[in-house]
Image: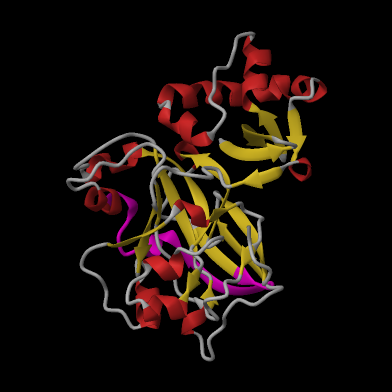
Amino acid sequence: MKLVTYEAGDNVSIGLYRGGIIYDLNKSYESVFEERGGFPKDMLSLIECGEDSLERVRQLDKSLGEWGDKLKAAGYTYGEAEVHLLAPVPRPKKNIVCLGVNYAEHAEETGHELPRFPVFFTKPPTVIIGPYDLIHLPTCSSQIDYEGELAFVFGKKGKNIGREDALDYVAGYTVMNDVTARDLQSNHHQWFKGKGLDTFGPMGPYFVTKEEVPDPHGLRLRTWLNGKIMQDSTTRNMIFKIPALISSLSMDMTVEPGDIVSTGTPSGVGHSRKPPVYLKAGDLVEVEVEGVGGLRNKVTSTRGP
């Protein structure tokens, strides 16, 4: 199932997405099962409540064939055009964990040796914007690049997790664009600043629960710039698959429900093209991961909030 965080008027809520319709989670559950849903108002809290809460959402999802029209008539639903979709987890508690050079062809195009261990770095939560929000060009950089990626969200707390158990700790998946200021990345000799600017983390549009993605390592991943395909690969080409990432990340370090990991980008980034292709005002960047969803973000030179 697909879950969303949306803004309708002055209210931010979480909903169940199905067939282009967003169902208010609490109101729909109360109507179908004649009991208070008791779901939290935000996605992070829902994930922290654990598998029991997600199972109740699955029960609601299974009931929509019978109840969908009734819920629409009751005013408990929205069309996508009626709301503002936010990132599924608009403000995680921790920095987003990202992977560098996790595709061999991307390592080759950027001149990196193949890593022996996962290359982790982080982006602050303040980078996150919604799946259709504006990417704001900064004043401190002129080399802004795109990086389409698959991200996963932890559903359980854990530490020293073995590879054989790792996928049990995943609650679901989403799509991310790891927007990067290449000149800052080079000037500061590390990645946090160049990847941590405001609006540099488009994410969404859905939180797709893991049963909808039985094999996260067989998904086509594509990025378009102004309608031209720039990246076209598959998550099968990851150097370090998700179980290896989880095992390595959790070594003597606690992971918690709602923590987000973005698994790296394939080849085709703008910085490695000849000549380089950097984002400019008016551009449209689209990222799609098969079975998970797609981002569509315009680029603007106006200063962000």
In front here: 34 or 233?
34
Q: Residue at x 33, y 38 (%)?
A: 256
Residue 50's image quarter? top left
Any magenta on residue 235? yes
Quarter placement of the N terminus: top right
At 17% from the left and 45% from the top, the residue drawn is 252
Does residue 207 lie above or below 197 as drawn? above
Residue 27 is a magenta residue? no
Instruction: State the residue lying farthest toward the bottom.
Output: 275
In x, y percent, where is residue 261? 39, 52
Residue sitting farthest toward the right = 73
The x, y position of residue 194, in whole percent, is 44, 71
> Would you say 283 lies left or right of 187 here?
right
Along the line of sight, the residue nearer the viewer: 76 or 167: 76
Range shown magenta: 224-243
Task: Give the vertical position of 171 relative to 238 (above or below).
Answer: above
108 to the left or right of 19: left
Residue 238 position within the rendered picture, expressed as x and y whole percent measured from the top left: 36, 63
Hey, which quadrant is residue 73 in on the image? top right
Is 213 drawn above or below residue 184 in the view shown?
above
Q: Position of residue 288 (x, y in %)?
A: 58, 59
Q: Toward which corner of the image does residue 132 lie, by quadrant?
A: bottom right
Question: What residue sits 27% from the left and 62% below the top?
Answer: 118
Q: Quadrant of the C terminus?
A: bottom right
